[in-house]
């Protein structure tokens, strides 16, 4: 006997604002769904191959002497260079699905592959395992997944075709990228589900200590077109003492909300808010004796003007005034940032080609004091700017 099943092949989908992982960062709404015929009697399934490549050109109106968009520290995630054409990420993903299981091998290549998989950067090659996992469906409602999978935390994802904006938010940059471990999902109905799991340390295949992190996600749909995800991770990320090998007491946690509402066929609103804290060492980089916090909020508004053109805006406020995360001043002090991003989406070749022009403004508080260095570099190589405006043009091909 044969039945037709649907398998989600794009496991990291947020919204293009009018049509748009599940596993890589946030589960919003899948736009890449393939119907696969499965022979239940013989247990046969089907393979599917997909992927994308992206490149971009970035102009920085500050004309920094180093041509870096990074500012003092970590002002950008992947689009780090200006004044040149740059390769972003190349993805090749294979999925096998049958009635009771799914296996995914998701490989990435290019400069962004190393930056996105920094926890496993053993060699200076630009090849990384982005995801490699399998899922077994015990019932229609209960399943378990084992392996390396993209994080459930956040609104945006690492894959350029899945996000409306090309440049990534500070919330994305300061959250986890991926996990290795085991997780279970139970669907109470088509409007509510719960995921819980245990994982190694953040952004690493191997674990730096014997402790395990706890992850969870509660999904519910209050009304049609409104999706809500409440995400959490808590973990001891401390390195063991090099002499006694004792594992220090430490704690890292993030509570995250990702939600979207499809107001109409052509207009979508989204929201991402996160609150994190850190106490003690974080993977050998040190940490505060008392818990310190960071957090932020991002608001999204995306609209389809025509079938082949859309425009979207993102406003984000992110604060690391405590200095516990990587967003710092030149003097190594904590800071905060207001960011406004305006992005166009041009779809060509039946949706296989995406062209994304984008303006972005990042404004930091001005560092007080005579002669104090600011956040961004000018054309003379001096840090005299507390804001940065860039214009980028991204070229993406997905298949």
Image (cartoon, rainbow, N blue to C red):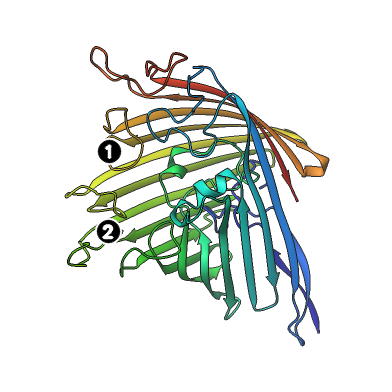
Whether residue 52 is visible, yes or no, is: yes
Q: Which residue is mark 1?
A: 323
**Which quadrant of the figure has residue 95?**
bottom right
Position of residue 268 measured from the top left corner of the image (x, y, whole percent): 60, 40
Against 193, residue 85 (above or below) is: above
Position of residue 317 measured from the top left corner of the image (x, y, whole percent): 40, 33
Q: Which residue is mark 2?
A: 238
Residues 142 and 233: in front is: 233
Position of residue 297 measured from the top left corner of the image (x, y, whole percent): 41, 39
What's the residue at 73%, 83% (across, down)?
A: 43
In the picture, measured across the screen, residue 43 lies left or right of residue 134, that is right
Of label 1 and label 2, which has the lower sequence position?
2
Whether residue 9 is visible, yes or no, is: no
SS for callout 2? loop
**Which quadrant of the figure has residue 53?**
top right
User: Around disc 1, counting alpha carbons within 10 Å, would you say few (fewer than 14), some (14 to 19), or many (20 or more)?
Assistant: many
């Amino acid at each position: 006997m044969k039945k037709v099943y649907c398998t989600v092949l794009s496991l990291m989908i947020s919204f293009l604002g009018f049509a748009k992982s599940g596993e890589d960062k946030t589960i919003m709404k899948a736009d890449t769904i393939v119907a696969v015929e499965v022979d239940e009697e013989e247990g046969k399934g089907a393979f599917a191959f997909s992927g994308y490549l992206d490149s971009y050109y970035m102009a920085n109106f500050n004309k920094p002497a180093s041509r870096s968009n990074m500012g003092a520290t970590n002002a950008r995630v992947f689009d780090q260079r200006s004044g040149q054409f740059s390769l972003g990420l190349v993805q090749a993903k294979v999925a096998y699905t049958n009635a009771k299981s799914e296996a995914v091998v998701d490989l990435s290549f290019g400069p962004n592959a190393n930056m996105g998989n920094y926890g496993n950067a053993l060699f200076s090659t630009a090849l990384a395992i982005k995801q490699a996992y399998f899922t077994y469906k015990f019932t229609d409602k209960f399943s378990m997944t084992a392996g390396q999978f993209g994080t459930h935390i956040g609104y945006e994802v690492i894959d350029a075709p899945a996000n409306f904006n090309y440049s990534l938010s500070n919330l994305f940059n300061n959250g986890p990228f991926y996990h290795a471990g085991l997780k279970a999902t139970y669907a109470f109905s088509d409007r509510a589900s719960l995921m819980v799991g245990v994982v190694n340390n953040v952004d690493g295949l191997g674990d730096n200590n014997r402790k395990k992190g706890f992850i969870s996600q509660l999904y519910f749909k209050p009304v049609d077109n409104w999706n809500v995800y409440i995400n959490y991770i808590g973990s001891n990320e401390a390195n063991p003492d090099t002499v006694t090998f004792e594992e220090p007491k430490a704690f890292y946690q993030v509570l995250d909300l990702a939600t979207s509402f499809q107001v109409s066929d052509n207009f979508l609103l989204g929201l991402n808010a996160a609150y994190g804290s850190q106490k003690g060492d974080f993977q050998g980089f040190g940490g505060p004796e008392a818990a310190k916090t960071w957090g932020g909020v991002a608001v999204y508004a995306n609209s389809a003007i025509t079938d082949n053109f859309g425009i979207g805006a993102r406003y984000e406020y992110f604060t690391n005034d405590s200095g516990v995360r990587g967003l710092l001043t030149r003097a190594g002090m904590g800071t905060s940032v207001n960011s406004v991003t305006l992005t166009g989406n041009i779809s060509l070749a039946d949706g296989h080609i995406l062209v994304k022009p984008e303006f972005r403004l990042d404004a930091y508080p001005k560092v007080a004091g005579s002669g104090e260095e600011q956040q961004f570099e000018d054309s003379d190589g001096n840090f005299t700017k507390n804001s940065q405006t860039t214009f980028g043009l991204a070229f993406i091909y997905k298949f």
